[in-house]
Image (cartoon, grey):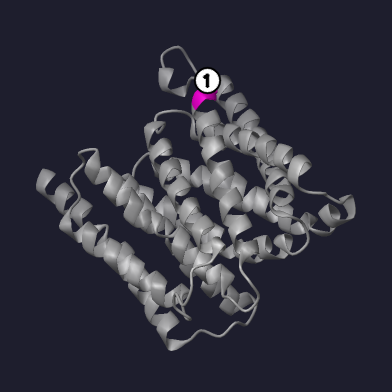
Amino acid sequence: MKNLKGSLILLLAAFIWGTAFVAQSSGADKVDTFTFNAFRSFVGVLFLLIVVKIRDYKINKTATSANADMAVKPWPIKGGIVCGIVLFLASGFQQAGIGMYPDGVAASGRSGFLTATYVVMVAVVVQIVGRKIHPLIVVSIIGVVCGLYLLCMSGGFDAIYIGDVFGFICAICFTVHILVIDKYSDVDSIKLSCLQFFVCGILSFTAMLIMEEPVLADVIAALIPILYAGVMSSGIAFTLQMVGQKYAEPHIASIVMCLESVFAVLAGWVVLGERLLPREYVGCALVFAAVILAQVPAFKTEKKNV
């Protein structure tokens, strides 16, 4: 039941990330990579600070000495710094890579597929460190990779671009991010998320000042996408990821979070009227089936323990 609970929370996070893709694409058209990431991160920090203050106030008001579980947890400074640095690298490589593709190349599709290869990387790392992976999980991973290829790579890999290299590095960074969050699963999830975005925001803002020339008018023009991405994608979805990973194993978490790509395509279909090819429908179905299949081993284990 723990894996199922974690998977449902991560499913909601993937839905938010996928539907926020429209806002992120719109913002990227108006401001540069680090400018968007910096302001988006700071919006997420402000939102989460408000949530933390309200929640801690309620905990302090109702907590008693007999109920130690209700005590306010400290800020996980070390975890926040580590997660923030990794997130800065992952989001930076992803956004920069998309901008490096030449005209006529399906940038978002290629980047989405390459980023999603962290499903395989997480499974490999988990196996190396000694956690046994159920054979059905291996089948799920194969299903996810095949489904995402059909969904994102309509033109295939006809050439290798620098954007592809950046996308692959991004996948490595997100693999590390998932494993780091798993390590800090016992800390306050909201405070950890708030700290990671503060660190990511500071690093992105510094990179913005060094590498970009931000214009206030452009930032104002991108305000709605920044606010949406900051509150929904950064503030809520990444916090849900950290909460969800308290219950789901890293390899299962990575499989569920791959639904982000499916939801992004479906959002483009519903919101922007983009048409889906038959192979893309098959890709969506394969990923959904793989996510459901990944839950089977947990159910079998719980049934044996009853």
Which residue: 70% across, 48% down? 34
The image shows residue 74, relative to residue 304, as above or below, that is above
Q: Is residue 73 visible?
A: yes
Percent position (x, y) of residue 15? Answer: 51, 61
Which residue: 27% across, 63% down? 140
Q: Nearer the viewer, residue 242 or 142?
A: 142
Which residue position holds label 1? 74
The image shows residue 6, relative to residue 153, as above or below, that is above
Residue 98: name its quadrant. bottom right
The image shows residue 41, relative to residue 164, as above or below, that is above
Q: Nearer the viewer, residue 173 or 195?
A: 173
In the rendered structure, which segment of residues is drawn in magenta? Answer: 73-78
Q: Secondary structure at mark 1?
A: loop
Percent position (x, y) of residue 133? Answer: 20, 50
Looking at the image, residue 57 sits to the left or right of residue 9; the answer is right
Q: Nearer the viewer, residue 229 or 214?
A: 214
Q: Residue furthest right?
A: 217
Amino acid carrying mark 1 in the image: Pro
Looking at the image, residue 54 sits to the left or right of residue 1; the answer is right
Q: Main secondary structure of the magenta part?
A: loop
Which residue: 63% across, 72% down? 102
Looking at the image, residue 186 sits to the left or right of residue 277; the answer is left
Based on the picture, tell me whether residue 77 belongs to the magenta stretch: yes
